[in-house]
Image (cartoon, rainbow, N blue to C red):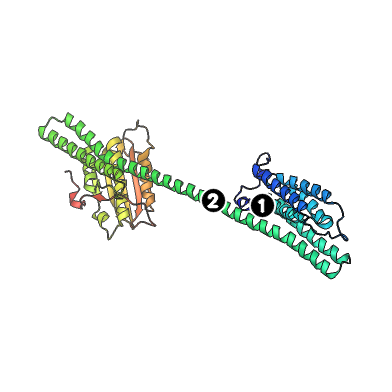
């Protein structure tokens, strides 16, 4: 076999199936090597007797011409592997039977190996079946032709070896090549999957940061805007200073939260989550600033780890923060917030009046409500409600299990004090 058989194992699949066939330099080199082998063995005088009677059936010159024609067909061994099988195979077989040149055995081996190695799977199977059938026919012809026992054995051995060896070798190399190609494709798919997962993780982090900014910092800034506007309209100096102090406190809290988030984003090695200055008392204070007569009822059990799981506590507080932020921004008195445990579930409800002419929103805030609730196995909804004797209102309602189902996404840790029933008063 030529020295490039090992390289053929890593070659691309049959090029006849992709684009126009072409003859490569490697194919020309292989054909040239076989042609040199044919001429060299013919000039050396090394030969064998044919199987049809005694001696040769044709001259050495005819044998060289036949085998050189077979060598020429090897130029298409990779682009059109059927050409060597159809041309070199029969010519080499005829030379083995009637001429006896040793180089014919090498050409027959190549003619059977090439279609299995470089052809499509259909071509490989068809050529394998034809080769096996031809070998069986040669054995049967030797038996029925009245040849002596040693001659029959020699024909069977040569036919079996010349058919089985290149075919088995070709299929083995083909299977290794296809297995390696499949492994490379699988590695490529795994790489694409890893990139997709990384992109999804980045997107999830972006959504989490956006929710944190909206739930916490936006709430603080809403309080700043509210207290600043209120201070500008107050004539009483003490009330004005109190409103400005509340505005300053909310601005400082927003600045702390923003610095915490920036610190986490800037530090790639710690893997910590930002802390947020968010608690139920601060939410009650925001509502009281918007509506001094707001009804706020928050059960102390919401912050009891024995009653409510940590993930549900965090989700409930975030949902409450989103509802309060929307009420402070877009709502007006009267405002009512209730949060507690009823019927074995955490229930949060916030109802506020609103201007009937204001357009309904469907932005990040409303999506965040559903996302927070779904993360712990609960539900949340928000939408307009008709007013009893006044303007239309807006209601946010969430129902969460007392303990999260499955493994919800981790929430940033929340710091602050717990609001008890007696602390639900303006600060």
| Circle 1 residue | 2
| Circle 2 residue | 184
Instruction: Name the residue at 82% across, 51% down.
Output: 60
Quarter that holds the N terminus: bottom right
Instruction: Name the residue at 88% across, 61% down.
Output: 54
- Secondary structure at badge 2 equals helix
Which of 322/334 is in front?
322
Is residue 293 in sight in this rendering?
A: no
Mark 1 neighbour density, 10 Å: few (under 14) some (14–19) many (20 or more): few
Horizontal side, residue 382 vs residue 189: left or right:
left
- Secondary structure at badge 1 equals loop
Label 2 – label 1 distance at C-alpha: 27 Å
Q: In which quarter of the image is residue 245?
A: top left
User: Sequence order check: which comes first, mark 2 or mark 1?
Assistant: 1
Which of 191/310 is in front?
191
Horizontal side, residue 93 vs residue 203: left or right:
right
Q: Quadrant of residue 285?
A: top left
Give percent across and percent down for residue 210: 34, 41
Give percent across and percent down for residue 148: 86, 69
């Amino acid at each position: 076999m030529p020295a490039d058989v090992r390289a053929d194992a890593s070659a691309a699949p049959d090029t006849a199936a992709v684009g126009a066939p072409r003859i490569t330099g490697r194919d020309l080199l292989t054909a040239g090597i076989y042609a040199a082998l044919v001429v060299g063995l013919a000039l050396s005088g090394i030969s064998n007797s044919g199987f049809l009677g005694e001696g040769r059936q044709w001259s050495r010159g005819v044998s060289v011409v036949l085998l050189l024609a077979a060598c020429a067909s090897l130029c298409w061994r990779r682009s059109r592997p059927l050409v060597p099988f159809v041309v070199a195979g029969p010519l080499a077989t005829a030379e083995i039977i009637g001429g006896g040149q040793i180089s014919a055995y090498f050409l027959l081996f190549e003619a059977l190996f090439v279609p299995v190695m470089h052809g499509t799977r259909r071509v490989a199977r068809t050529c394998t079946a034809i080769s096996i059938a031809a070998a069986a026919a040669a054995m049967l012809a030797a038996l029925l032709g009245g040849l002596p026992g040693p001659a029959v054995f020699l024909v069977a051995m040569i036919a079996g070896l010349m058919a089985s060896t290149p075919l088995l070798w070709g299929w083995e190399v083909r299977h290794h090549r296809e297995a390696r190609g499949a492994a490379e494709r699988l590695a490529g798919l795994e790489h694409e999957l890893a990139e997709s997962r990384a992109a999804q993780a980045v997107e999830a982090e972006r959504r989490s940061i956006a929710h944190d900014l909206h739930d916490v910092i936006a709430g603080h800034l809403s309080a700043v805007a509210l207290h600043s506007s209120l201070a500008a309209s107050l004539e009483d100096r003490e009330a004005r200073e109190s409103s400005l102090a509340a505005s300053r406190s909310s601005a400082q809290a927003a600045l702390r939260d923003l610095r915490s988030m920036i610190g986490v984003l800037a530090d790639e090695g710690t893997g910590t989550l930002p802390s947020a200055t968010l608690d139920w008392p601060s939410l009650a204070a925001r509502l009281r600033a918007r509506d001094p007569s707001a009804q706020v009822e928050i059960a102390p059990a919401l912050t009891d780890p024995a009653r409510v799981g940590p993930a549900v506590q965090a989700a409930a507080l975030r949902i409450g923060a989103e509802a309060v932020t929307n009420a402070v921004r877009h709502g007006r008195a009267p405002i009512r917030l209730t949060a507690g445990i009823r019927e074995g579930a955490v229930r949060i409800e916030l109802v506020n009046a609103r201007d009937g002419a204001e357009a309904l929103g469907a932005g990040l805030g409303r999506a965040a409500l559903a996302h927070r609730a779904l993360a712990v196995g609960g539900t949340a909804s928000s939408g307009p409600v008709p007013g009893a004797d006044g303007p239309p209102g807006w209601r946010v309602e969430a129902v969460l299990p007392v303990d999260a189902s499955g493994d919800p996404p981790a929430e940033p840790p929340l710091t602050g004090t717990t609001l008890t029933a007696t602390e639900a008063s303006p600060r």
